[in-house]
Amino acid sequence: MPRNRPGTLRATQPLLNRPYGRDTPVPARIHGLSARTSLAVHRYEALSDDYYVFPGVTDRALRRYRAFLSPPGNRPRYPYLEECGCRGCSFEDVRHARDVLDEVLCHLPDRARAELGRLIASLDAVYLSRTLPDPFVDARRVWRPDVWWYRRLEGCRYARSGVT
Ligand SMILES: [Zn+2]
């Protein structure tokens, strides 16, 4: 999540996270997940009052995570910080996408959690293989130093290579 998690903002925007009504079409199945798990995910997204969770956020987080890992070749990938803490821009930082996936995972019923968990684990393996450990992580001021996906070498957003 961004550095300044806007709790106050969250409180002032309750209408953005309205549950699906009867007239709301059933959302599309999430790529890589069963219809049943997709539904559980959509249900959580619709009911959550977390500012960073909104309908479609899991699909978006998965796409962002895949996109970050998808460039061909073996060159290391470097996550980078996004300064804007709004829930749209935050996805520039792939680690935010991973945060969101973690958040969703924690709120799913057992079967759905297991299925999404397997999907995330397969992406995590690629993330680990394509990023580098940051030996100075404890000296740096890292947003979430306790979380493993933040303990990887950061890049600069505007570097010519290695950053997407
Ligand atoms: Zn923004």
Image (spheres, helix red, strand yellow):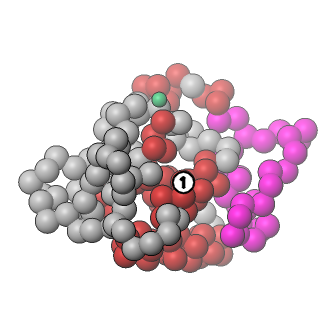
Q: Is residue 39 magenta?
A: yes
Q: Is residue 53 left or right of residue 32?
A: left
Q: Residues within 10 Å of mark 1 (few under 14, many from 20)?
A: many
Give the quarter of the image for residue 157. Answer: top left
Whether residue 69 is visible here, answered yes or no, is yes
Q: Nearer the viewer, residue 50 or 163?
A: 163
List the residue tagged with mark 1.
Answer: 64
Give the quarter of the image for residue 47. Answer: top right
Q: Is residue 13 left or right of residue 96?
A: right
* Rendered position, 86 above or below 159: above
Q: Nearer the viewer, residue 159 or 6?
A: 159
Q: Residue, x 62% and y 42% (percent of image)?
A: 54
Give the quarter of the image for residue 63. Answer: bottom right
Give the image location of residue 107, x and y in percent: 56, 59
* Rendered position, 59 above or below 156: below
Give the image location of residue 160, x and y in percent: 35, 48
Q: Residue, x 70% and y 35% (percent of image)?
A: 18
Range of the magenta residues? 17-46
Q: Is residue 100 magenta?
A: no
Dividing the image into 4 quarters, which one contains the N terminus? top left
Q: Please identify the residue farthest to the right as the structure is shown.
A: 23
Q: Amino acid at mark 1?
A: Arg
Whether residue 58 is visible here, answered yes or no, is no
